[in-house]
Amino acid sequence: MAVLFSPLTVKSFSRAVQCRLGIAEGIMTDSNERKMDAGQKGNWDFTFAFWSLRLWLGVRALFVGIAKYGAYHSVAMPLIDPTTGQPDASGVMVNVNIKSYALANYAGMAAGLRDKFSHDPLFPKFALDLFDRMLGPAFILTGIMLIIGLGTRISLLAQAALYIALTVGLVLIDQSDGVAWLGIHIALVSAAFMLAQYNRFVVLKKW
């Protein structure tokens, strides 16, 4: 039995279908926009997380390098009378340790640590001298690179290499506390590598 549809019925049905499709498209569009907004917000969260790691590692490396140019010097100064705030009338002098920074003060490794390394047969003298000379400048350079975003991945890789080299040395002289401390730094560098894709405001983004 044939069913006949009037033009009015077909037209109404067509409008109903178009209306449903429009509503569905609107829902999908709203859903996609919400997902995009959530994704952008999430990306910024990752960016802020990376910036925290990048700045912390950069600032720490910079000042670790600068600290290697610091040294304390004993200076004779007059004893200050606590009641008057003036030099004591007796003319007594006391030695005061004052810290200063200069190229002449540079020491890549502490004297005690360097002495332990020098007694280990696995550390050739020339390699120990080379590592001692480059340690401070390397920390300063990688720190500045991280802070300004100049070759972020390269600077992170260089810092990882420094921490691994120091770890090898501390393992050989049985400094377990120092090894654990360096392990934390390696974990932070690894976390920074995982978030590097969300890095922004850099000089060289790719590297």
Image (cartoon, rainbow, N blue to C red):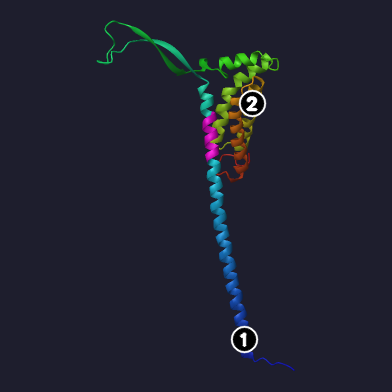
What residue is drawn where x is 55% and y is 51%? 42
Which residue is label 2 attached to?
Answer: 167
Identify the secondary structure beneath mark 1: helix
**Residue 7's spot in the image, x, y percent?**
64, 90
Which residue is label 1 attached to?
Answer: 11
Quarter of image, res 182: top right
What span is colored magenta in the figure? 52-61
Q: Please name the amino acid that badge 1 sits on.
A: Lys
What residue is drawn where x is 66% and y is 24%? 168
Q: Residue 165 got which mark? A: none
Quarter of image, res 139: top right
**Residue 152's spot in the image, x, y percent?**
59, 37
- Residue 163 or 139: which is nearer the viewer? 163
- Residue 158 or 85: which is nearer the viewer? 85
The residue carrying pointer 1 sits among few (fewer than 14), some (14 to 19) or many (20 or more) residues within 10 Å by Cα, namely few
Looking at the figure, which quarter contains the N terminus? bottom right
Residue 58 counted in the magenta span: yes
